[in-house]
Image (cartoon, rainbow, N blue to C red):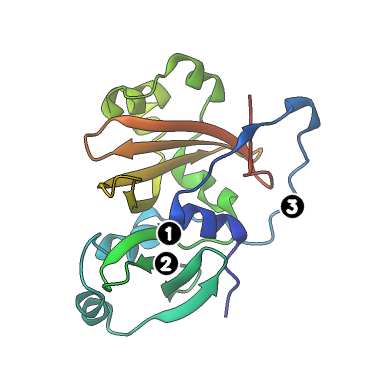
């Protein structure tokens, strides 16, 4: 059984709340020990078969199996894998899908699929801006990014909304994360360095 990285557990819950880090003290990313992804179609094949809000029984019937249940510090996930790609799913107590995320072992695996990104672009982006405009600013078709996760989030008032998380990864391990609301507005923008996902780059 493959180990699910700690960063994946955080992505499942979309709880990447972090303080800014001192950019002069950035750690050097370790060498990659897994192969980069080369086919977007293969990476998203199982992910695209999962629909937020659907029943576990319907998902299991579509997948052809019950999947593998894995306990993590973020709670239980159920994963379906196809080689080194797949999807991890979190369910609400009523067995409806709450969140899904692409399966991966190293965020840098996505680099060939997302296109390079100039992290300084975040200085010109604002929260609540139109997501389509933000995507064009990042690079449009030449830097399409990839949807890494999608989840239903419940606020303190009990209101549930849906958020999609997209990422762009550079060869040096730096990455940009953009969260998009159901209204197709930008709800969060962050930049990170691989190996220090709990710290934002300034």
Per the image, the residue denoted by label 2 is: 88
* Left or right of residue 6: residue 129: left
Above or below for 12 versus 28? below
The one nearer the camera, 56 or 194, is 56
Q: Going 68% across and 44% down the picture, which residue do you hit?
A: 196
The percent position of residue 117, horizontal first and vertical second, equals: 51, 29
Element type at marker 3?
loop
Above or below for 76 versus 32? below
Answer whether labels 1 and 2 touch (C-beta < 8 Å): yes
Q: Going 27% across and 24% down the picture, which residue do you hit?
A: 130
- Indicate which disc, 3 or 2, sits on the residue closer to the N terminus: 3
Task: Name the quarter where the N terminus is drawn.
Answer: bottom right
Above or below for 24 versus 82? above
Q: Nearer the viewer, mark 1 or mark 2?
A: 2
Per the image, the residue denoted by label 3 is: 31
Answer whether labels 1 and 3 touch (C-beta < 8 Å): no
- Indicate which disc, 1 or 3, sits on the residue closer to the N terminus: 3
* Left or right of residue 129: residue 75: right
Give how far apart the Cα atoms at labels 1 and 3 are: 22 Å
Per the image, the residue denoted by label 1 is: 102
Q: Going 55% across and 69% down the picture, which residue do you hit?
A: 72
The one nearer the camera, 166 or 129, is 129
Q: Going 40% across and 19% down the picture, which residue do you hit?
A: 126
């Amino acid at each position: 059984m493959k180990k699910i990285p700690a960063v994946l557990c955080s992505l499942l819950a979309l709880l990447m709340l972090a303080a800014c880090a001192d950019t002069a003290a950035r750690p050097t990313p370790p060498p990659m020990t897994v192969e980069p992804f080369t086919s977007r179609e293969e990476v998203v094949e199982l992910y695209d078969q999962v629909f937020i809000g659907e029943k576990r029984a319907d998902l299991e019937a579509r997948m052809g199996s019950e999947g593998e249940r894995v306990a993590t510090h973020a709670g239980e996930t159920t994963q379906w894998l196809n080689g080194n790609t797949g999807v991890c799913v979190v369910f609400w107590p009523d067995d409806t899908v709450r969140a899904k995320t692409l399966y991966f072992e190293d965020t840098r695996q996505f680099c060939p699929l997302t296109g390079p990104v100039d992290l300084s672009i975040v200085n010109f982006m604002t929260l609540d801006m139109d997501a389509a405009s933000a995507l064009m600013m990042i690079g449009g078709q030449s830097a399409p990014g990839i949807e890494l996760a999608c989840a239903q989030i419940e606020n303190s008032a009990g209101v549930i909304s849906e958020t999609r998380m997209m990422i762009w990864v550079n060869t040096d391990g730096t990455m940009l994360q953009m969260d998009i609301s159901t209204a197709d507005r930008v709800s969060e923008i962050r930049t990170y360095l691989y190996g220090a996902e709990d710290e934002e780059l300034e």
